[in-house]
Image: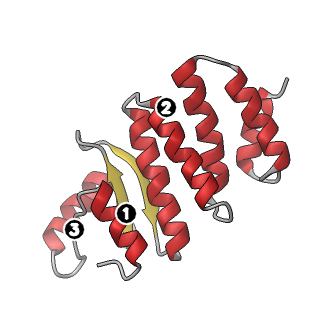
Amino acid sequence: MYPNSSVAEFITRHFVPVRVHVKENAEAFKQLGQRFSAQWTPTVLIVDPDGQERHRLEGFLPADDFLAQLKVGLAHAEFAGGRFLEAEKLFRLVAGEHPATESAPEALYWAGVARYKGTNDAGALTDTARAFSQRYSDTAWAKKASVWKT
């Protein structure tokens, strides 16, 4: 289903992929589209075991950007499950392995939040704000983190 082997391998390792084709599975597509408010194809949803949406991608992306988004989604699912330190590791993985993607600043932000939630150490937020002064300083994520500067 995914021509890029890195993407296909990551999906196989971390997700249970479900594909509903707009024409071939029209009724299922309609039902799932209504349930998850899917308005465009492709829509990729990362859903936790309870059926709660944790991350959404709409439209096509180049392989590196798509892989980064999948990792962000996996990290958000870990975060939502209260597994903050695992979420932090995954967010940092995105920032480290996909630094040129639009996902990297988001991952840097959420890595700081996850570290704070996992340790209750406010220094995690200060460190994150400081990191934004060195990288991704012109992003919305840097603005969000700016309140953490001391």
* Picture residue at 76% right of the left edge, 52% below the top: 139
Rendering quarter of residue 23: bottom left
Mark 2 lies on residue: 85
- Asked if residue 148 is positioned above or below residue 12 in the image, the reply reads above
Q: CA distance from mark 3 to mark 1?
A: 24 Å
Q: Separation of disc 1 and disc 2 at Cα?
A: 20 Å
Residue sitting at x 70%, y 46%? 141
Label 3 Cα crowd, 10 Å radius (few <14 / some 14-19 / many 20+): some
Image location of residue 4, percent across then percent down = 41, 79
Task: Please indicate whether residue 137 sits to the left or right of residue 141 in the image.
Answer: right
The label on residue 29 is: 3
Q: Residue at x 47, y 75 (%)?
A: 60
Q: Amino acid at mark 3?
A: Phe
Between the residue at mark 3 and the residue at mark 2, the CA separation in whole angstroms equals 36 Å
Circle 3 SS class: helix
Callout in the foreground (3, 1): 1
